[in-house]
Amino acid sequence: MPKLIPIDELNAELDAICLQIAAGKCIAVPTETVYGLAADASNGLAVARIFEMKGRPKFNPLICHVSDVEMARQIGEFDPLAEQLASAFWPGPLTLVLPLRQEYGIHPLVSANLGTVGLRYPVGPATKIIAACGKPLAAPSANRSGKISPTTAQHVVREFPESDLTVIDNGACSMGIESTIVKLESGSIRILRPGSVTAEMIEAATGIVPEVAGSNSDIEAPGMMASHYAPNAVLRLNQSTCPKASGLIAFGPGKDRDRCEAVETINLSETGDLAEAASRLYGALSALDEAGIETISVEPIPLTGLGVAINDRLCRAAAPKDDIT
Ligand code: TXA
Ligand code: MG
């Protein structure tokens, strides 16, 4: 059984947690986006355990989490644009893919030998753990490969019920959708994965219009497989009707919904607030899965601002599962 540590007991448990990290164990830590499955990024065996626990089909690179910008600068090469993005959005849901400083000792499994490293300075108690352990932590989302990312400690427990994983319980994640990943190359910014830090926000902070990597961004963010974040149910996107016995993920006030025959409806945001919808998306997919619903219809969600990231995750959740490679 996983062991839950309530957030108000974190201080008392910090030493024990750092001992576990030093011994190469994985810990589930909350961030503002989703819960991560974290381990010492310089310990190859510990990192390999992350892949093993997740059942990741390939050794995709992992994001390295840091407790401050100084730690990030030791691991990756910051140019002025990286500094600008870090000061605008860190701590926060933005991952910077930068050239790796080999001498720091990040294990090659973390960077998948790409010569780059994904760096993230998250909001919340994860930074306290990283600072206490004095080491960057490699952490993918704390779910089995291809499944829905966890946004509560209970979701993590449900993914790894047989394990003895320590899970720091900080309640529901405030953002609920994974970080925006950007790659910086000679003054340009490429968005490899959309997230809560939108293209518009990046442009406003830097004056640079980011390029958006196409759907075939395999080489740039190898973890971005077509099928990902997937519930067991079949997802039908952009629906305005829903068949009998299906579930409905609604969005907005919706005047005509009374004709809907869904057995269970979850509205991501009654007011049509995209941030609220993002924070509730994975919880809604999990809840409908838990209810054993086999088909989920999803109402249209606007493709603006944070809606880009929400639609990105929905498309992946709806993709044929045999696309997982
Ligand atoms: O919000 C988040 O980013 C969460 C929390 C736990 O921080 N983490 C997360 O990690 O979503 P993960 O492993 O599920 O997704 C990491 C993505 C993958 O698609 C991977 O390919 C990409 O980041 N990535 C990591 N390092 C990279 C690199 N050096 N170059 C390109 N892509 C990289
Ligand atoms: Mg993930």
Image (cartoon, rainbow, N blue to C red):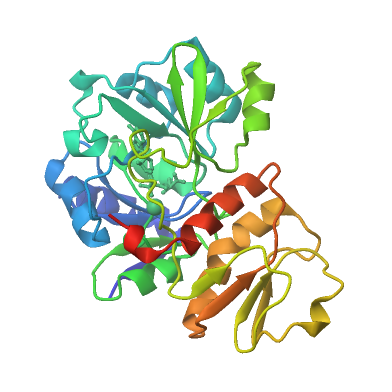
Nearer to the camera, 91 or 55? 55
| Left or right of 33 in this view: 252 | right
Q: Residue 280 at x, y = what percent?
A: 61, 63
Q: Is residue 264 visible in the rendered structure shown here?
A: yes
Nearer to the camera, 320 or 8? 320
Q: Is residue 175 visible in the rendered structure shown here?
A: no
Nearer to the camera, 7 or 284? 284
| Left or right of 112 in this view: 92 | right
Q: Quadrant of residue 102?
A: top left
| Left or right of 52 in this view: 93 | right
317 relative to 80, above or below:
below
What residue is at 84 percent from the left and 75 percent from the top?
256
Q: Residue 93 at x, y = what percent?
A: 53, 40
Q: Residue 86 at x, y = what percent?
A: 52, 24
Q: Residue 74 at x, y = what percent?
A: 32, 20
| Left or right of 292 in this view: 156 | left
What residue is at 48 percent from the left and 36 percent from the top?
214
What residue is at 48 percent from the left and 33 percent from the top?
213
Q: Quadrant of residue 150?
A: bottom left
What residue is at 73 percent from the left and 64 percent from the top?
251
How many numbered circles does the render carry? 0
